[in-house]
Amino acid sequence: MIRHFPARLSEKKIIAENTAELTFAVSDPDFSFKAGQYVSVEIPSLSEAAAPDRYHDFSIASSPLNPKEISIAFRISKSIFKTALLALPIGGTVNIDGPKGVLVLPDTNVSPLIFVAGGIGITPLISMIRMATETSLSQQITLLYCNTSKEMTAYAEELSILEKQNPHFVLRSLIGAPDEKLFAPYMQKTSKSFWYIVGAPAMTAVVKQILKNFDIMDPQVRIEEFSGYLAPLKI
Ligand SMILES: Cc1cc2nc3c(=O)[nH]c(=O)nc-3n(C[C@H](O)[C@H](O)[C@H](O)COP(=O)(O)OP(=O)(O)OC[C@H]3O[C@@H](n4cnc5c(N)ncnc54)[C@H](O)[C@@H]3O)c2cc1C
């Protein structure tokens, strides 16, 4: 059920080059979410602004096992919204609307899952990987994580630790532009796997086309587009 509530900024940190993570203490005692869902974040001081400047959608990167605190992560830009968000002091308040979205883990363990993350598209996927590890889920997950550089790779260290902790999770870190040349060697025709693709529209389109060439389409493919990141923005 979608809820509306204020949330207080409790932590602000840089987690990769040009990439920030903010954590909010949730005031609604009944708030819960599924790993992979997102929220709309509204900044009260921008309440008079037009829609994209007033609020932005962000996937929740933290684990749903602690719904009292939610973390979001994003590439820093000079947009009106992100300038105001980054200027928010610790203890400052935003309005949250959510949870929203259907990019969640299957109810029961199914065929292997292959996650493809383009840059900051890692956010909903790391929430699922964190939860799967914390609950010792036997779901097989492979993550193809593409970034333009090592420095831009958010959560790199934690993902390596999760790979050691979780015998069902495999990490493949790919460095380069998110194009067919980069992804193709790691993608193969498979009748069983389910694919979760998250990133900027240009990146999700490339991966979707490679899968289509293998005749892999709906319902084996789920896509979350981070609309608002327009090519050639580095994600
Ligand atoms: C379901 C979902 C989950 C998302 N999760 C994340 C996340 O975890 N981390 C993250 O960094 N980003 C995420 N995004 C994208 C995020 O909402 C912003 O669009 C993005 O961060 C760019 O914001 P900006 O302030 O830098 O750019 P802006 O200056 O706000 O936008 C750049 C351009 O894109 C347009 N635009 C902005 N938002 C949208 C939109 N939603 N749809 C279409 N056009 C738009 C603007 O009008 C402008 O022309 C998500 C988006 C969606 C839809």
Image (cartoon, rainbow, N blue to C red):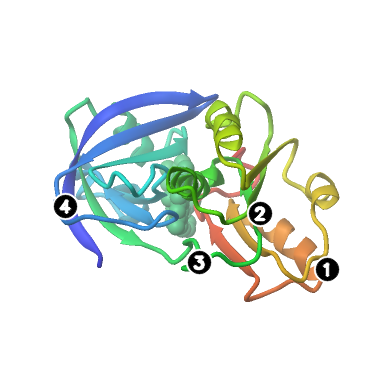
Viewport quadrant of the C terminus: top right
**Is disc 2's CB within 8 Å of ligand 1?**
no
Q: What element carries label 4?
A: strand
Give amino acid for label 1.
Answer: Asn
Q: Earlier in the sequence, mark 4 or mark 1?
A: 4
Q: In this picture, is 170 found above or below 110?
A: above
User: Residue 160 falls in which quadrant of the image?
Assistant: top right
Dot label at residue 5: 4
**3D distance between C-alphas at marks 4 and 1:** 44 Å
- Residues at marks 1 and 3 touching, judged by CB atoms closer than 8 Å: no
User: Residue 43 falls in which quadrant of the image?
Assistant: top left
Q: Is mark 3 on a helix, strand or loop?
A: loop
| Circle 2 residue | 202
Choose mark 4 or mark 2, whichever is in front.
Answer: 4
Give amino acid for label 3.
Answer: Pro
| Circle 3 residue | 106
Give amino acid for label 4.
Answer: Phe
Q: In this picture, is 5 found above or below 73?
A: below
Q: Earlier in the sequence, mark 4 or mark 2?
A: 4
Q: Residue 73 at x, y = what percent?
A: 43, 38
Residue beneath the point at 27% across and 47% down = 67
Q: In this picture, is 62 found above or below 204?
A: above
Q: Which of marks 1 and 3 is nearer the N terminus?
A: 3
Choose mark 3 or mark 2, whichever is in front.
Answer: 3
Q: Which of marks 3 and 2 is nearer the N terminus?
A: 3
**3D distance between C-alphas at marks 1 and 3:** 25 Å
Q: How crowded is mark 4: few (under 14 residues within 10 Å), some or many (20 or more)?
A: few
Q: How crowded is mark 2: few (under 14 residues within 10 Å), some or many (20 or more)?
A: some
